[in-house]
């Protein structure tokens, strides 16, 4: 087996896996969007709250569709030795790669700006929907319980909120080190906000996060190199 044939076969197998993974993800996304009730029974009530809160169904559909397109272009491009499909595959992977790099740069340089945007979106949800909507309450209870945190910034996110007014001007128990959580107790407890807590966890696991990101980038670079190698070899055979 020559080098070209080996690379071609590996390209087909790799993109076939991507295609199947994308199809599975797309199927899950459609299932969640069309019949969320039965999906809830499979993954449990806590996960279902997270699912509805962040619209995981639509996210899975988008990512699944992208993976299917990539898998199709890469697999068929290698199998049929189509320069057009291979260059399309290369272009899409390159766009994704550049977008990831840009997102990483923005996250590092404008982290405070990103935090303010998230706060502007999350704080109204905590004030108006926490304690009122079951799904929102469930996901935030799970988050605050697991991360040992309170609100997005701190306990003040719940001041004058629906929950605060419905529970005799008290805060969720996660905001205090005791069961009764009034403002004085919340101030003394000094429970950290969930954004800062999550940020600290990411910093503590920076090596793991960086390793995963580097692995994804390496796969994307390898995919671009292989597709361009096949493209050039096909051009040489023509």
Image: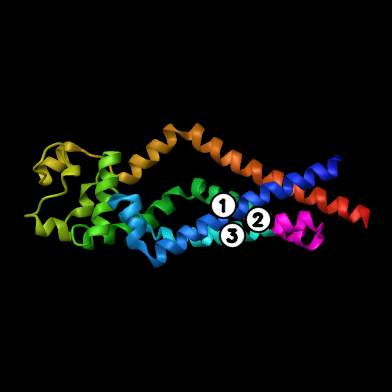
Question: Depth check: 8 or 129 in front?
Answer: 8
Boundaries of the magenta span: 73-91
Q: Is 117 situated left or right of 226 in this image? A: left
- When the figure is inspected, residue 166 is found, relative to residue 104, above or below; the finding is below
> Which residue position is annotated with label 1?
21
Q: Whole-percent x and y of residue 4? A: 84, 44
Q: Is residue 58 visible?
A: no
Say which residue appears at 51% left-offset and 56% top-offset: 25
The answer to whether any part of residue 171 appears in the image is: yes
Q: Position of residue 231 (x, y in %)?
A: 82, 54
Q: 221 or 28, which lies in front?
A: 28
Q: Which of disc 2 and disc 1 is earlier in sequence?
A: 1
Residues under labels 1 and 2: Cα distance?
9 Å
Q: Give the position of the C terminus as an image quadrant.
A: bottom right
Dot 1 falls on a residue whose secondary structure is helix
The verdict on residue 184 being magenta is: no
**Which quarter of the picture shows residue 79?**
bottom right
Q: Give x and y (percent) for residue 212.
A: 54, 39
Secondary structure under badge 2? helix
Q: Give left or right: position of 94 versus 148.
A: right
Sequence-wise, the earlier of marks 3 and 2 is: 3
Residue 199 to residue 158: above or below: above
In the image, which is nearer the foreground, mark 1 or mark 3?
1
- Residue beneath disc 3: 66
Packing grade of label 2 (10 A; few <14, some 14-19, many >=20) is: many
- Name the secondary structure under disc 3: helix
**Image location of residue 133, percent across then percent down:** 22, 62
Badge 2 is on which residue? Answer: 71
Q: Is residue 43 left or right of residue 176?
A: right
Picture layout, residue 212 above or below residue 47: above
**Is the Cβ of the residue at disc 1 closer than 8 Å to that at disc 2?**
yes
């Amino acid at each position: 087996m020559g080098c070209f044939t080996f690379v071609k076969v590996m390209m087909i197998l790799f993109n076939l896996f991507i295609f199947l993974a994308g199809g599975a993800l797309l199927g899950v996304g459609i299932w969640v969007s069309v019949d969320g009730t039965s999906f809830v029974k499979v993954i449990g009530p806590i996960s279902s709250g997270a699912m509805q809160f962040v619209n995981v169904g639509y996210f899975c559909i988008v990512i699944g569709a992208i993976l299917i397109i990539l898998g199709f272009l890469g697999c068929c491009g290698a199998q049929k030795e189509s320069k057009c499909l291979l260059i399309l595959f290369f272009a899409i992977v390159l766009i994704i790669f550049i977008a990831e790099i840009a997102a990483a740069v923005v996250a590092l340089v404008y982290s405070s700006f990103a935090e303010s945007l998230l706060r502007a979106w999350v704080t109204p949800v905590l004030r108006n929907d926490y304690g009122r909507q079951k799904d929102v309450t469930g996901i935030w209870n799970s988050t605050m319980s697991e991360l040992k945190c309170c609100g997005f910034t701190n306990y003040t996110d719940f001041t004058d909120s629906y929950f605060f007014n419905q529970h005799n001007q008290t805060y969720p128990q996660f905001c205090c080190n005791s069961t009764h959580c009034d403002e004085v107790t919340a101030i003394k407890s000094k429970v950290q906000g969930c954004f800062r807590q999550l940020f600290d966890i990411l910093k503590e696991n920076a090596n793991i996060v960086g390793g995963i990101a580097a692995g994804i980038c390496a796969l994307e670079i390898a995919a671009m190199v292989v597709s361009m190698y096949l493209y050039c070899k096909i051009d040489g055979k023509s």
